[in-house]
Amino acid sequence: MKHGAFILCFALSYCFHEGALSRTINGQRTWPVPYRRYDHRPKTDPYCQALYPFCPTGDRDGRIPYLRDTDVVEVFRLQAPVWEFKYGDLLGKVHIMHDAIGFRSSETGRNYTMEWYELFQLGNCTFPHLRAELSAPFWCNQGAACFFEGIDDVHWMQNGTLEKIGKMTGAQFNEFAKWAQKDNETGIFYETWTVRADPSQNSTTWFDSYDCSQFVHRAYRKMAEMGVTLTSSTKTSYTKIYLFSGEPSYLGNDSTIFGQPSAKALADSIRSFYNAFRPHQSPQNFILSLLEVLENVVLDKTFYLLYNFEYWHLPMKAPYLRITYEEVPLP
């Protein structure tokens, strides 16, 4: 199937839909903390550079082609190992997978792929940069949806999944496209971690991830709301990366923590914690940093999480971290 590209990515000034979402009801905090949405997507800082450009041949206006209402559009479930283009099935062996959605127009014969992922790669979305000229950690954290013409059959089928799961009308596709654009304008940051109280099925979730698979789940739910029937002949499983902790404590944001003399100890502790995750370390420094991470997380039971651009302290507990490949049925 041939390649072209449309990109669903916006670079606008932004503001919050609402204030801090670490909210309480009758004095009790609500969990999981709601993911904050925005009115517009912010411009990216020139400091943030991607090793592999985001949706490089895309349409910067974020256009999705309009289909005739009478068209019949097939929907495909797409899944392949993360960085399959570079490492083949290596990450697939430990079920670290990337998810996307494919579409095929019956009237035009054109195929399309829609996927949501990091603008500056996973590491930049998960950990910040510590810049000498700035008191606060500097984050290159944005995720966005990319819509482009073509489905790379080999990429998805060789080590993953390319499966037809349903069909919709052109009118439904056009409605879905409007939803996808709005979802992309308002959901701007990537979240790697799902944080829970323990591994049991009904344990409290403190924070939800916001990644490629969560976009796919939202998209499938929207299709179901529109009356689209989705079915799969295989198990629909997705990658989850968990941290396990006791009840998190809210700490504050950049303005209340960094540059405030009264919060110097906390600011130093957060910067020291993230220093162990800095990029481009020598092999010797990497080993030392790994030991430091183990000391912080396992011995000191400490992890600092940025969520909604606010910092939280996670009192870590065993098993600390787990990568799973869990079934999530189609809606």
Image: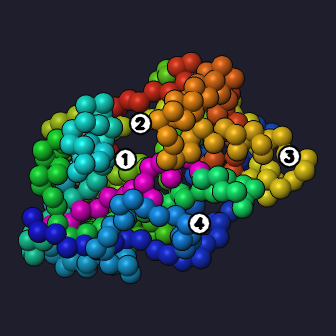
Picture quadrant of residue 234: top left
Lower sequence index among marks 3 and 4: 4
Residue where numbered disc 3 is placed: 263
Residue where numbered disc 1 is placed: 213
Task: Mark 3: give few (<14), some (14-19) or many (20+) Cα within 10 Å.
Answer: few
Task: Judge by depth and name the residue closer to the eye, 63 or 251.
Answer: 251
For the residue labelled by badge 3, is the local secondary structure a helix, a strand or a loop?
helix
Give the Cα separation between the discs numbered 2 and 4: 25 Å
For the residue labelled by badge 2, is the local secondary structure a helix, a strand or a loop?
strand
Give the Cα separation between the discs numbered 4 and 1: 20 Å
Lower sequence index among marks 1 and 3: 1
Q: In this rendering, is residue 6 above or below 220?
A: below
Please provide percent x and percent y for residue 252: 77, 49
Asked whether, in this view, residue 78 is left or right of residue 241, the answer is left
Q: In this rendering, is residue 173 above or below 317?
A: below
Give the Cα separation between the discs numbered 1 and 2: 9 Å
| Residue type, mark 2 in image | Lys
Labelled disc at residue 240: 2
Task: Mark 2: give few (<14), some (14-19) or many (20+) Cα within 10 Å.
Answer: many
